[in-house]
Image (cartoon, grey):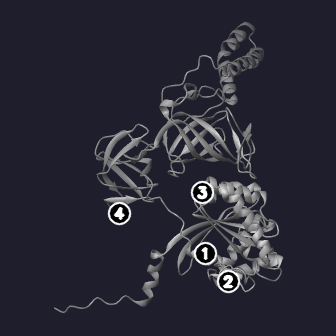
Amino acid sequence: MNVHAQPAEPAFVAPLHEPERKSLLRFIACGSVDHGKSTLIGRLLYESKQVFDDQLDALAADSRKFGTQGDALDFSLLLDGLAAEREQNITIDVAYRFFSTARRQFIVIDAPGHEEYTANMATGASVADLALVLVAVEEGLTRQTKRHLVILSMLGVRHVVLAVNKMDRVGWSRDAFGAVETAFRELATDLGFVDIACIPVAAKNGDNVTTRSIHLPWYRGPSLLDYLETVEPARTSNLDPFRMPIQWVNRPDADFRGCSGLITSGEMRVGMPVKIFPAGRVTRIARIATFDGDLGHATAGRSVTLTFTDPLDASRGDIVADAKRAPAVTKRIEARIFWMKDRPLERGQTYLVKLATSTATARVEPGLSIIDLDTRRAVAADGIGANEVGHCTLTFDRAIALDRYEDCRDTGSFVLIDPETFDTVAMGCVEEIVPLQNGPRLATWLPSRAGAVSGKLTRWTETHARSLVKAVSWRATGSLDTFVVTFVISGSTKLAGSVALTEILTKVLIYYGHERIWALVPWGKRQAAP
C-alpha cells in the first residue's frame, strides 16, 4: 500500500478563507441634509475598488441624467437608488452596502438627513457599532445634526467619528476645521460617547477619504478609511447576561417539545440552570438543538431550540434567562423614546408595546418631558411631538420581563404600536424599572379610552365604530317584532318597513350616546387578573 502525502492547498483557495478571519464593522453615515453623506460613502466605495466596471458604466449614465457634478461622476447615485431620491437629490430610505478591504469587512448604513425621514435614520442607528457624522464645514452643526447625535446617544452608539466635509470650499482652513471640532466636542460632552475622532475630508474629490491629502499638511491623523479599518468598538453581547426570548414552541410530534428563539445576549451550555420569565420557574437546559445537530454550547446570535429537564408551561413572549443574572419583572417603567408620528404622544393614551417577543398594552402616565437639542436637558412638556426625543412613564396591563437598555439592549428596547392602525409610532429604551412589589396601586388601572388586546381580556372600552355597529345590529334585531305587528295590522309591507326603519334610526342614536357616556365613567371597572 502506498501512502501519499496530503497535497498542498492551491494558492487560489487561501483568499476564500480571508473573510472568515476579518472582523466586521457596522457603521452609519448620518448628519444633516446636503452635507455629503451619500457622496462620501460612494467615494469610499469607489476609492477602495468596490465598484465593478458595469456599475461604473451605469453610474456614468446616471450621472449624466441625474447628477449634480457636471461631467464628473456623481458618487451619491451609488447609494441613492430610489427614483424620488434621484429626482430630489436627497436620501429618503436607508441604504445598506457591504464592502471589504484587506483588513476588515464593513456594512455601511447610509441614512437620510432630512428631518422628515429621521425615523429611517433611527432605524439604521439601532444596529450600528459606530457612527460617522458628516458636517459641512461652512454650515457647522445644524439642528438636525444635534438631533441625530441625541438619537445616537439614546440608542447606545458610543463610538463617533466626525467627518468635516467640503474642506475645499474654505481653502483647507485649519481654523475652520478647528471651530467645527470644538463645537462638536462641546456638544458631545454629556451624550455618553466614549470615543470621538475628528477627520477633515473633501468627499467630492476624495481628499483624505482613503489616503492622506496633500491639501491638508497640518492634519497629522489617519485618513477616514484608515481610521475605520483600525477602530475597535466595544462589543459586549457575549459578556451580557444570557437572554433568549421565546419565539415559538416547537412540537413536531408527541415525543418532542422545545422552545425556539434567538440568543440575543450572553451564552449558555447544556446543564446550565435557567429561569423562565415572567413566571420565574427554575430548570436546567437538557438539549440545545439546531438544524445541524445538537450543541453543547451556544452564544449570542445563534438561533436554537431548547429542551429542559423539567416539564414547563413556556410560550411565546417568555424569556429564558440566566438564573443568577435574571431580568426584572414589572408592570411599570421609565423610558426614553423617539416619537415618529405627527400626532403627539400625550398622557392617558394607550398603545401596544412590543418588547422582544412579548406584546402588552401600555398606558402613558403623566410626567412627560422632551430633550432640548441645544442644552440636552429634559424639559417638561404636555406631549412629545414628531421627531422629538423625550422621557415618559409607561404602565403595562400585565407583568413582563425586561432589562434596562444599558444592561441588555435586546430585552431593554421596545416599539410602541397604534392599536387601531398597527403603525409603529415610537421606539424606546428602558431607563428605569419600577419593582413590581413597589408599584403604585393605581398603576395597574388601564385608561378608559380605546385599548387593545394583548393576550389577556383587559379591554374595558370600545372604539366608536364597534359601539355603533353593536347599536345598529341590536336595534335591527329588536325591530323585527315592530315590522311583524305593523304588517299584521295594516297589511302593507311598505308601511311596516318605514315604521321599523324609523324605530331603528331613533333608538340607535339614543343607544349610541348612552354607551359612549358610560364608556367614559371609570366607576365599576375592574381589571381581569393577569
Q: Amino acid at mark 4?
A: Asp
Res. 99 visible in picture: no
User: From the viewer's perspective, is 293 left or right of 99?
Assistant: left
Disc 3 from disc 4: Cα separation: 30 Å
* Residue type at numbered disc 3: Ser
Upstream in the sequence, badge 2 or badge 3? 3
Give the label, 2 or 4, closer to the camera: 2
Q: Nearer the viewer, residue 441 or 471?
A: 441
Which tag, 1 or 2, sits closer to the chain's start?
A: 2
Nearest the viewer among 319 and 391 is 391
Amino acid type assigned to the residue bearing label 1 in the image = Tyr
Residue wearing tag 2: 212
Can you tell which of label 3 and label 4 is closer to the viewer? 3
Residue to which mark 3 is pinned: 126
Residue at numbered disc 1: 227
Q: From what the image shows, is residue 488 above or below residue 508?
A: above
Q: Nearer the viewer, mark 1 or mark 4?
A: 1
Question: Where residue 477 sits: x, y (%)?
Answer: 64, 19
Q: Position of residue 490 (x, y in %)?
A: 75, 9
Q: Residues within 10 Å of mark 1 (few under 14, many from 20)?
A: some
